[in-house]
Image (cartoon, rainbow, N blue to C red):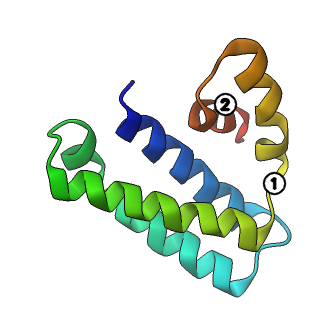
């Protein structure tokens, strides 16, 4: 898996976790929605076609997604992802994604 693909997967998980946990704020919801929109919009061009601007946009949206986790507090999926990452060597985004409902 490419770094961009892993970054995209992790960022989408951050957005989903922020949007669907009980302590989400209006600010973190807006940021998560904007970040997830940018991630989805640029996914194919960044990961498959490797268009430089799309890759840059995915990484910028990933930073936005990371901010949502801090603003909305981490949900259970993020809390449980650590052991999967350490014990199984899973990428962060895959570990969180595996734990989302």
Image vertical order of residue 79 relative to residue 31, above or below: above
Residue linked to disc 2: 95
> At 30% across and 61% down in the image, what residue appears?
57
Is residue 6 visible in this depiction of the protein? yes
Residue 68 image point, x, y percent: 65, 68
Q: Is residue 28 left or right of residue 51?
A: right
What is the number of the mark on residue 1? Answer: none
Pick out the residue farthest to the top.
88
Q: CA distance from mark 2 to mark 1?
A: 13 Å
Q: Position of residue 12 (x, y in %)?
A: 52, 52
The foreground one among 80 and 19 is 80
Quadrant in which the C terminus appears? top right
| Secondary structure at numbered mark 1 | loop
The residue identified by callout 1 is 75
Point out the tag, 2 or 1, that comes first from the N-terminus: 1
- SS class of the residue under badge 2? helix
Relative depth, front residue between 18 and 84: 84
Q: Residue at x 52, y 68 (%)?
A: 64
């Amino acid at each position: 898996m490419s770094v961009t693909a892993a970054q995209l997967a992790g960022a989408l998980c951050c957005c989903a976790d922020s949007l669907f946990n009980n302590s989400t704020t209006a600010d973190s919801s807006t940021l998560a929605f904007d970040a997830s929109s940018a991630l989805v919009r640029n996914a194919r061009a960044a990961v498959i076609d490797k268009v430089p601007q799309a890759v840059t946009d995915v990484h910028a949206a990933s930073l936005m997604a990371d901010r949502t986790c801090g603003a909305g507090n981490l949900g259970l999926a993020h809390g449980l992802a650590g052991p999967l990452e350490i014990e199984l060597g899973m990428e962060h985004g895959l570990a969180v994604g595996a734990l989302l409902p």
